Amino acid sequence: MKALLIDDERMARREMRRLLAAHPEIEVVGEADSGHAALSLLPTLKPDVLFLDIQMPEMDGFEFVNAMGDHAPQVVFCTAYDAHALRAFEVNAVGYLLKPVDPVRLAAVIQKLHDPGPPDTEAQDETPLRETDRVLLKGEQRSWFVPVRSIYLLQSEGNYTHVFFEGGKVLLPRSLGALEQRLNLPMFFRANRAQLINTRAITDVAEWFSGGLQATLASGDKVEISRRQATLFRKQKGL
C-alpha cells in the first residue's frame, strides 16, 4: 500500500516515516510540505493512503480533501488538535491520529486500511480506550466527540446500547459487552447484566435487596448493583 505524507513540518514527516517503518506493508512513496505540492504529486505517485496534517498554510487539510474531488485516496489525519475530529469523520477519514502519534493507535488505523469492515458494527476498531481519550458517538441526527471520562452510564438494549454522557445520550448499534471491552478502565464497573457505570459519577451507595447495592449517580440516575457484582464492588472499592 503506497502512502504519501503531507505535513508542513519536516520533523513531523520524519517521525511518521519512522513509525511507518514498523509496517512493511506500507510503502512511503513521497512527501509534501503543502497541499498544493501534494496535489501535483498525486497523478504520478498514485498513493493509496494519505497521512495528512490539518493545520497547514495556504491550504488546510480539509481544503485539500475537497480539492482532490472524487476517486481520492484514503485519508488518515495526523494533527496536534482534537477539535477537528468530528469534521474529519464527516469527510470519511479512515483515522484521526493525535500528535505525538501513538504506535498502537497507528497500528489500529493501518489494520482498518487493510480491512475497513462495515460501518457501525462489531468489526470496528477494538483498541482499548484510555482515560484521556475522546470518542466519536454517532447518532441518527447528530454526532458528539466527547471525553471518555464524561461517559457515566451505558445501558444495554438488545444488540444496541444507550450511552449517557455529560450533555446528552446516544443509542449505538453495538452490544454492551463490546463497548465494555473498549472501556476496559478502572473507572468503569459492570453493575449488572444490562448496565455499566462510571464509578466516578457515583454520589451515594445504599444497601439494597438480597445483598445488592443501589448506586446514585450525579445525574440523578439510580443503578442497581446485583448481589454478585456488589460483592466485587465492596472488595474493589472498600477500605
Image (spheres, rainbow, N blue to C red):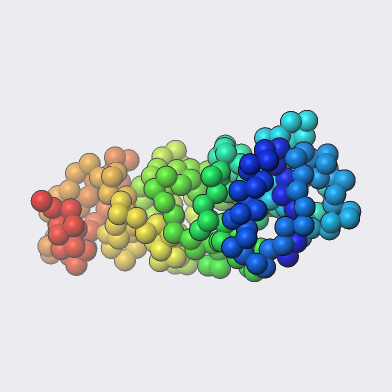
Q: Which quarter of the figure has residue 225?
A: bottom left
Q: Specify the quadrant of the image occupied by residue 132.
A: top left
Taking the image as shown, residue 239 lies to the left or right of residue 189, namely left
In percent of width and height, residue 46 lies at 84, 58
Using the rendered image of the protein, determine whether residue 135 is visible from the camera's viewpoint: yes
Q: Where in the figure is residue 12, as x and y percent of width and height?
A: 63, 43
- Residue 41: image location, x then y, percent: 85, 49
Q: Quadrant of residue 154?
A: bottom left
| Quadrant of the snapshot with the N terminus | bottom right
Residue at 53% over, 56% down: 103
- Foreground: 160 or 103? 103
Q: Is residue 113 above or below residue 150?
A: below
From the viewer's perspective, is 140 left or right of 30? left
Q: Nearer the viewer, residue 203 or 208?
A: 203
Which residue is at a point 49% across and 63% down the rendered structure image? 126
Seen at 36% across and 47% down, the residue is: 152
Provide residue 151's location: percent of width, then percent of height: 40, 47
Answer yes or no: is residue 116 visible. Answer: no
- Return the residue found at the far top: 58
Q: Is residue 229 left or right of residue 179?
A: left
